[in-house]
Amino acid sequence: MPDLAYLASLPRTRGAAAALLLDDLGRVLLVKPTYKNGWFLPGGVIEEGESPLRACVRECEEELGLVPRLGGLVCVDWGSPHDGVDAVNVFVFGGTITAEEVGRLRLPPDELSDYTLAAPDKIPDLAPPHIARRMVPSLRALGEGRAVYLEDGREPAPSR
């Protein structure tokens, strides 16, 4: 039997999941939250007992009104603690979105004010730096059919 008191004393890290959805022109679907500045991938917090993949699907369904076609994990990005906010592990899943699906998007007005399809080179002009940094390695990993590990949106130096 596990030592429940010991397990309860261990540090916790928040989890989040996001969808990197590309249209047939290679543009990235970004959403604009009403409660913070900038453009982000659709997604959100992983709820207690929920897997990262299930959280990504649920968040897309809530935020976009559709269940995305996801091909798999493309990125795990560890976000360091800052300004009193705990560290976070962000799981990014890659997928596609059709023009017909874009036409059917339904955003919750209390949470999201807009969406856009952005060319990858335009994302640094739209997204906060930590999101923009994540895009190049995530898009590369998506194209290569693999996942990449990042820390604060950057690939860590190789360990010796």
Image (cartoon, helix red, strand yellow):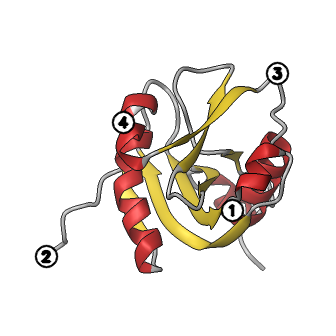
If you read the primary sequence from the N terminus, does the residue marked by circle 2 or circle 1 appear first? 1
Quadrant (top left, top right, bottom left, bottom right) of the N terminus: bottom right
Percent across and percent down for residue 28 are 53, 50
Q: Which residue type does callout 3 highlight?
A: Asp
- Identity of the residue drawn at 36% across and 36% down: 124
Front residue (pair 112, 106)? 106
Whether label 2 touches label 3, CB < 8 Å: no
Front residue (pair 30, 111)? 30
Q: Which residue type does callout 1 highlight?
A: Pro
Which residue lies under the disc numbered 2?
160
For the residues labelled 2 and 4, the Cα–Cα distance comes to: 32 Å
If you read the primary sequence from the N terminus, does the residue marked by circle 1 or circle 3 appear first? 1
For the residues labelled 2 and 3, the Cα–Cα distance comes to: 48 Å
Q: Which residue type does callout 4 highlight?
A: Pro
Which residue lies under the disc numbered 4?
124
**Mark 3 Cα shell of 10 Å, populated few (<14), some (14-19), many (≥20):** few
Mark number displayed over residue 110 = 3
